[in-house]
Every structure is written in structure tokens, then in C-alpha cells.
Image: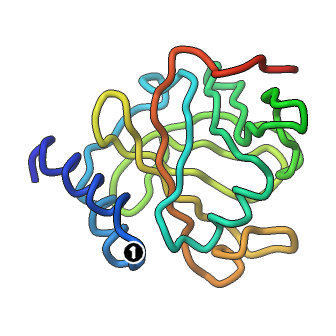
Amino acid sequence: MTKYDHKEQFEFLKSKPQNTEEELIQLFDQLPTVSAHQILHRWKGGTFSGEWDSEELKQIGWYGKWFKSLLDAVPIICYNDKGQLFSNQLMQGEATMWDISFRGKVSATMVYDGKPFFDHFRKIDDNTLMGIMSGKPIEGAPESIMQGKYSFFYLEKVDQFPTHYIS
């Protein structure tokens, strides 16, 4: 699959009213890897239609993620009731960035500080990442992980946040 095919397949799955886990895993497995150093940036997030956790993320006002440095990542940036962005502590802390093997390839992975969860990333293009959340099914885990499944999402690079970020 070429770089163009990856983007085309990604856009197709993004536009579908429902995706299967098999379709999303197939795309993820074909994507090239990316190192943690390469993705240090601000990212706007999105989910694929029909994903287990889409509704939960909407309810908390999820905006995206911010990988400031390898040892300083903000995993869940949300809108507050004033329309400002903030770090939601839903996962009990922030995160770090590592290159970790997942599904047969070493690629950038965000490791949550407060929960046994991982966000694994592969590259759609220079401005777009596909992510899979995996982890241990414990109390407070996202629905997908509790069901023994992955949670799929994507990130699009942004130069600035659309509003004020409060620390």
C-alpha cells in the first residue's frame, strides 16, 4: 500500500457510518512507523464512527493531545465550560512518550502515568496519525478495553490550539 493509498483508505474509513475492528486493524498494521521524537507537537483528535468510546469522548469535550517532550505529554485535552482547553485528569495524570513494539513493529507510544494504558501510533502522513489504545482491563478503563478490544482514533497536527490552553 502506498502513502496515497494509506491516506485514501483512512479517509474512506473516517467517512463510513460504521467500521469493523478488522478494517481498522488492517489499516493500522499496514501503516509505516513513526518515532516518538517525530511526533512532538500539538494534535487535534478524532474517532472513527461506531467506535466504542466515541460518545464518552464527546461527553468530556475531548479536543486532542499535546506531546511537549518525551517526558511530558498531555494525553487528554478537553474543552471546559468556558470554551478553554485544559488537561483532563480522567486517567489520573499525564504521560510519557516511548518507542515500543506493538503488533510486530516498533513505533511511537504514549504511556499513561496513572493507568496501565498505552496509545500506539502509526503514520498516515506527515500531519496525520492513527492511534490504538490498549491496556489492562481495570476499573475505570474505557469501555473498549473492558471488553478486551482496542479503541481506535486519529490525530491531526495543529500549529496552535483554537483557544486558550489553561495549565
Place of residue 158 in the rendered image (x, y in percent of width and height, measured from the top left): 50, 23
Name the secondary structure under disc 1.
loop
Q: Quadrant of the C terminus?
A: top right
Q: Is residue 46 above or below residue 147?
A: above
Give the mark count: 1
Q: How is the image coloured?
A: rainbow
- Residue toward you, 101 or 19: 19
Q: Could you tell me the amino acid type at mark 1? A: Asn
Residue shown at the point (34%, 52%) measured from the top left: 105
Q: Which residue is mark 1?
A: 19
- Residue toward you, 10 or 126: 10
- Residue toward you, 121 or 102: 121
Residue reaching furthest left?
2
Mark 1 neighbour density, 10 Å: few (under 14) some (14–19) many (20 or more): some
Place of residue 128 in the rendered image (x, y in percent of width and height, measured from the top left): 38, 37
Residue shown at the point (85%, 68%) measured from the top left: 140
Place of residue 124 in the rendered image (x, y in percent of width and height, measured from the top left): 30, 42
Residue shown at the point (90%, 38%) measured from the top left: 81
Residue shown at the point (28%, 68%) measured from the top left: 26
Tell me if 13 is positioned left or right of 102 in this view: left
Q: Quadrant of the N terminus?
A: bottom left
Q: Quadrant of residue 43?
A: top right
Q: Is residue 127 above or below residue 159?
A: below
Tell me if 136 is positioned left or right of 99 in this view: right
